Amino acid sequence: MLFSLFGWWYGAGWAGTVRSTRRRLASLASMFSIAILLRTLFSPWRRIITYPGAGIDAKLRAFGDNLVSRCVGFTVRIFVLLAAAVSLVFLSLIGLIELLAWPLAPILAAMLIAKGLLAL
């Protein structure tokens, strides 16, 4: 039984941890809608668009309004993308630590049990 536990731990268990880390990263990327944010980076904020009128004054005002709406949309989307990048890096580091600590966990558990028994 002990051999099958170690066989699973260093085989299927470790592979499952890799799949779990990938799934968490994909879920986080989906939660932030990174692909949509990149595709709509220069789109107007909340689709607020001013349609130009007949005169040159109305056209210039519409151009200015639309430019401001696009700048606001770009700024908000950039900050959300930066938050997504920070979150992805943080989650990647946690996953990397988990993957590196996975093979050491049984050894560490045995050492801690031995240390506890020797301290009695």
Image (cartoon, rainbow, N blue to C red):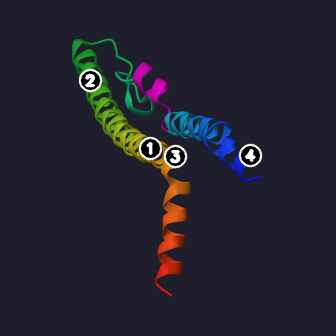
> Given contact means CB atoms under 8 Å apart, are the residues at marks 2 and 4 in contact?
no
> Given contact means CB atoms under 8 Å apart, are the residues at marks 1 and 3 in contact?
yes
Give percent across and percent down for residue 58: 27, 19
| Residue drawn at x 48%, y 42% as measured from the top left | 99
Residue toward you, 1 or 75: 1
- Work out which residue is located at the far right of the displayed protein and give it: 1
Question: At numbered mark 4, what does the secondary structure look like: helix, strand or loop?
Answer: helix
Give percent across and percent down for residue 22: 55, 34
Q: CA distance from mark 2 to mark 4?
A: 64 Å
Q: Is residue 117 above or below residue 14?
A: below
Please tell me whether mark 1 or mark 3 is closer to you in this view: 3
Q: Earlier in the sequence, mark 2 or mark 3?
A: 2
Q: Residues within 10 Å of mark 4 (few under 14, many from 20)?
A: few
Is 18 in the magenta? no
**Range of residues picked out in magenta:** 32-39
Amino acid found under the numbered disc labelled 3: Pro
Q: CA distance from mark 1 to mark 4?
A: 21 Å
Give percent across and percent down for residue 92: 42, 40
- Pointer 1 residue: 100
